[in-house]
Image: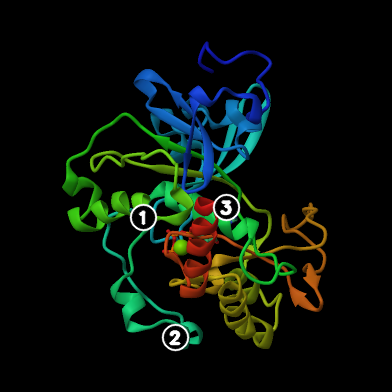
């Protein structure tokens, strides 16, 4: 149920009163306190899908497991869920945040040269609000060559169910979890933002839009892209991300979604047909995982300069 204080029809996101909004890591959210159903933080991307994002459409009674499909290749807890409400279905990708958990590091061989021992030693799963902030930052791409644009998933909402767990049940380590709370104060994009304190004993569920297409690993295993093209993908993404000021520690073909020109489904095979989308001869991809993304040093310096300049104004 949409809370009573929200007018109908729903006002556009910018018109919702600031009383109901917070800004965290540069991204604005409408905060819906849902009583016994927990709290939902909705971004402007998610706002038009509010009915489908409410927990009753995908979470309550573990609906995501009964109507959704678990991503079997994922090491985390990830589901694709068709959330239906008010006569409309939203294709969602939900992911339980691994903030505070130990990071199982495996570096893709073709990315090894770009990742230092220091990067590995400092690796931690980012917090949920930081993850959405990084996703939006990659989408916006303010740093680096303006003509280079990296596609991402749409960050729709963060859901905090009411249930509380024992710390051991969520596998979190105090020091890593605390670090995620502390980064809020230090992050240049977070200045003036609300300190959303993360609870050690609660789940954080990230809700993204599903992207049509398949990951590059699947496309290669079906013989849809050549070996040369497959092998050149990871180095290309690493280079593009670096140019835009990011490093993804778990960069790998499973994290690139390739799109086809016609996403029509063949009635015979159930598979999409048509050629892959390309730009200047290169495969068009969307990047889909941000829990181990960090900014590069030049990007951090640039952000700090922007911040200093805005404070001096
Ligand atoms: N929005 C999306 N659209 C399409 N496919 C997706 C989307 N998000 C995830 N997937 C698919 O689900 C898989 C697992 O997702 P993800 O990498 O986020 O999980 P994970 O728990 O981080 O797994 P791993 O630890 O192996 O990286 C991806 O490799 C991809 O095939
Ligand atoms: Mg992943």
Q: Extreme front residue here?
A: 312
Q: Give the vertical position of 209 relative to 188 (above or below).
A: above
Which of the pair 57/307 is nearer the observer? 307
Front residue of this view, candidates 113 and 94:
113
Name the element at disc 3: helix
Is residue 265 toward the left or the right of residue 71 in the image?
Answer: right
Q: Is residue 198 above or below residue 138?
A: above
Q: Give the quadrant of residue 161.
A: top left
Mark 3 = which residue? 136
Relative to 268, is 145 on the left or the right? left
Q: Earlier in the sequence, mark 3 or mark 2?
A: 2
- Which residue shows up at 53% across the image and 67% down it? 302
Task: Tell me the number on the disc at residue 186.
Answer: 1
CA separation in Å, label 3 and label 1 = 18 Å
**In the displayed structure, would residue 110 be above or below residue 58?**
below
Instruction: Provide the secondary structure element on which disc 2 rests.
Output: helix
Judge the density around disc 1: few (<14), some (14-19), many (≥20) Cα neighbours within 10 Å: few
Q: Are marks 2 and 1 in contact (CB under 8 Å)?
A: no
Distance of mark 3 from mark 2, alpha carbons? 26 Å
């Amino acid at each position: 149920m949409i809370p009573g204080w929200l007018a109908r029809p729903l006002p556009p996101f910018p018109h919702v009163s600031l009383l109901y909004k917070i800004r965290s890591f540069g991204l604005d959210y409408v905060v819906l306190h849902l009583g016994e159903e927990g709290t939902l933080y909705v971004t402007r991307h998610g706002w038009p899908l509010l009915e489908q994002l409410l927990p009753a459409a995908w979470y309550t009674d573990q609906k995501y497991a009964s109507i959704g499909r678990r991503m079997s290749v994922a090491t985390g807890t990830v589901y694709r869920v068709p959330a239906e409400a008010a006569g409309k279905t939203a294709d969602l990708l939900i992911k339980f945040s691994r903030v505070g958990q130990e990071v199982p590091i495996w570096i893709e061989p073709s990315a090894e040269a770009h990742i230092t021992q220091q990067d590995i030693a400092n690796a931690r799963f980012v917090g949920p609000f930081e993850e959405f902030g990084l996703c939006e930052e990659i989408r916006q791409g303010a740093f680096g060559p303006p003509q280079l644009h990296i596609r991402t998933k749409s960050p729709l909402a963060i859901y905090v169910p009411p249930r509380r767990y024992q710390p051991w049940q969520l596998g979190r380590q105090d020091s890593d979890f605390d670090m995620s709370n502390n980064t809020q104060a230090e992050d240049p994009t977070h200045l003036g933002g609300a300190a959303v304190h993360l609870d050690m004993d609660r789940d954080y569920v990230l809700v993204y839009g599903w992207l049509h297409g398949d990951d590059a690993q699947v496309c290669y295993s079906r013989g849809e892209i050549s070996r040369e093209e497959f092998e050149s993908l990871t180095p290309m993404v690493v280079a593009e991300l670096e140019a835009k000021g990011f490093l993804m520690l778990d960069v790998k073909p499973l994290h690139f979604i390739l799109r086809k020109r016609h996403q029509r489904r063949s009635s015979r095979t159930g598979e999409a047909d048509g050629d892959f989308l390309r730009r200047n001869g290169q495969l068009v991809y969307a990047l889909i995982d941000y829990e181990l993304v960090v900014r590069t040093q030049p990007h951090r310096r640039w952000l700090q300069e922007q911040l200093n300049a805005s404070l001096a104004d």
